[in-house]
């Protein structure tokens, strides 16, 4: 697959969470963050295509760059193959991600309504956070939870053998990792 160049404004920074379920046990892992970007993507010499898309970034990239809502970013990533079911994004293996301008530098982005001003969850906090099912429409463009750092799509695998995650039954579940008293929460 060809590398995709992307450019745009970060709309949301979400936790990247995977839940492995075996019998009555649940094992959460967090492999970084998802950046919801409103911008353009292009492959090769093709013209840029505008849209909103998710880019998976690892914990090290987020630690170095400290992505925030409103940042203007540019980078390269690979389309997620169908066989890679634990990544709920459009692009992954993001590399050479540059923060071109910070939201606070540009003063162009309105502060989100509370509680969405919180910093993104760390991978450790995401694995420990309580999880509630979320209506899928809440994470859609224009949805009430779209810019929230607590709303995310969780990859869930039900295992028959805990040593082999690839043979499990995979699903993608919208979830809220935020506080229980959030006024914006809507269950499915």
Image (cartoon, helix red, strand yellow):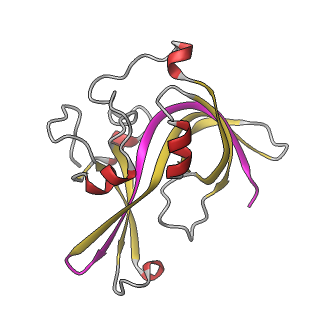
Q: Quadrant of residue 106?
A: top right
Magenta range: 1-24
Residue 31's spot in the image, x, y percent?
46, 58
Which quarter of the rendered picture does the N terminus lie within? Answer: bottom right
Residue at image x 34%, y 48%? 136
Task: Point out the residue furthest to the top here.
Answer: 107
Q: Which quadrant of the figure has residue 38? A: top right
- Whether residue 14 is visible, yes or no, is yes
- Residue located farthest toward the left when viewing the structure as drawn: 181
Count the numbered circles shown.
0
Q: Is residue 48 left or right of residue 37?
A: right
In the image, residue 10 lies at what x, y percent? 52, 32
Quadrant of the image occupied by residue 20:
bottom left
Instruction: Report if residue 54 is visible in the image.
Output: no
Q: Residue at x 48, y 47 (%)?
A: 34
User: In the picture provided, is 44 more to the left or to the right than 127?
Assistant: right
Up the image or down, 68 lies above or below 29; here it is: above
Considering every residue shown, the one lying at the far right of the view is: 45
Secondary structure predominantly adopted by residues drawn in magenta: strand
Relative horizontal placement of residue 66, taking residue 123 as reference (left or right): right
- On the image, the x and y values in percent for residue 37 come to 55, 36
Image position, residue 171 (x, y; %): 39, 66
Residue 124 drawn above or below residue 144? below
At horizontal 61% and vertical 64% (from top left) the residue drawn is: 81
Magenta residue check for 57: no
- Relative height, residue 108 to residue 31 (above, below): above
- Residue 22 on the magenta span: yes
């Amino acid at each position: 697959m060809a590398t995709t160049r992307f450019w745009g404004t970060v709309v949301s920074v979400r936790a990247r969470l995977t839940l492995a379920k075996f019998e009555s046990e649940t094992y959460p892992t967090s492999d970084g963050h998802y950046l919801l970007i409103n911008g353009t993507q292009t492959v090769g010499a093709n013209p840029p295509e505008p849209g909103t898309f998710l880019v998976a970034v690892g914990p090290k990239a987020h630690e170095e760059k400290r992505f925030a809502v409103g940042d203007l970013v540019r980078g390269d990533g690979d389309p997620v193959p169908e066989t890679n079911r634990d990544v709920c994004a459009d692009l992954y293996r993001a590399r050479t991600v540059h923060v071109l301008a910070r939201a606070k530098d540009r003063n162009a982005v309105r502060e989100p309504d509370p509680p969405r001003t919180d910093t993104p969850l760390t991978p450790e906090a995401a694995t420990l956070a309580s999880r509630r099912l979320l209506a899928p429409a809440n994470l859609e463009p224009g949805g009430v939870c779209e810019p929230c750092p607590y709303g995310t799509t969780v990859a869930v695998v039900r295992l028959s053998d805990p040593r082999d995650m690839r043979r499990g039954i995979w699903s993608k579940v919208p979830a809220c990792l935020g506080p229980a008293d959030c006024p914006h929460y809507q269950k499915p």
